[in-house]
Each structure stands twice: as C-alpha cells, then as structure tokens.
Image: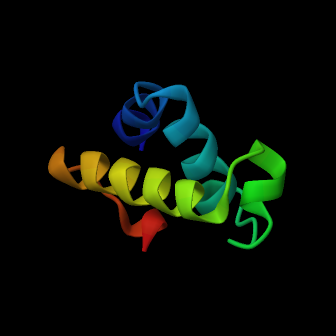
C-alpha cells in the first residue's frame, strides 16, 4: 500500500488531485470538476491518464476500479 501511495504522490498535481478525490475520498464523479475547477472532460481525461500511469507500474490498483 505504501508503494501505491508513493506512486500517487509522484503523479502530476492535477492528476493526483483527481485520483485522490475520486478514488481515495470517493467523491462523486460529477462533483470533482467543481472542486478542482476544471471541465468535466478535463477531469475525466486526467483520471484516465493517472489510472493508466498507475496501472503501468503493476501496483495494486483495486482501489481505482
């Protein structure tokens, strides 16, 4: 779990914000854009890229499912 959290901390700031809010804090996807101040399309894209980066590291990502 520590490796997983370290990997999240190394993401670009905007991707880390979206991942933490959406997947670790369980914020509803419709609320995330208003919190981070980005469009829904941008937050969806950031989430997708961040999950792809984390999946590419072969870390336990069951939290992000």
Viewer-nearest residue: 50 or 26: 50
Quadrant of image for the C terminus:
bottom left
Res. 31 image quadrant = bottom right
Q: Please tell me whether residue 23 is drawn above or below residue 2 in the rendered image.
A: below
Image point (82%, 49%), residue name: 35
Viewer-nearest residue: 43 or 65: 43
Image point (24%, 55%), residue name: 55
Residue 19 point in image, percent of width and height: 55, 51
Q: Is residue 15 left or right of residue 40?
A: left
Q: Is residue 46 left or right of residue 22?
A: left
Residue 46 point in image, percent of width and height: 47, 50
Residue 42 point in image, percent of width and height: 55, 54
Image point (56%, 35%), residue name: 14
How many tags in the picture?
Answer: 0
Q: Is residue 37 left or right of residue 22?
A: right
Quadrant of image for the N terminus:
top left
């Amino acid at each position: 779990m520590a490796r997983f959290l370290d990997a999240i901390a190394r993401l670009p700031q905007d991707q880390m914000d979206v991942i933490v809010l959406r997947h670790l804090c369980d914020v509803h996807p419709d609320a995330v854009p208003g919190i981070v101040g980005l469009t829904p399309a941008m937050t969806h894209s950031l989430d997708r890229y961040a999950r792809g980066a984390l999946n590419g590291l072969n870390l336990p990502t069951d939290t992000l499912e």
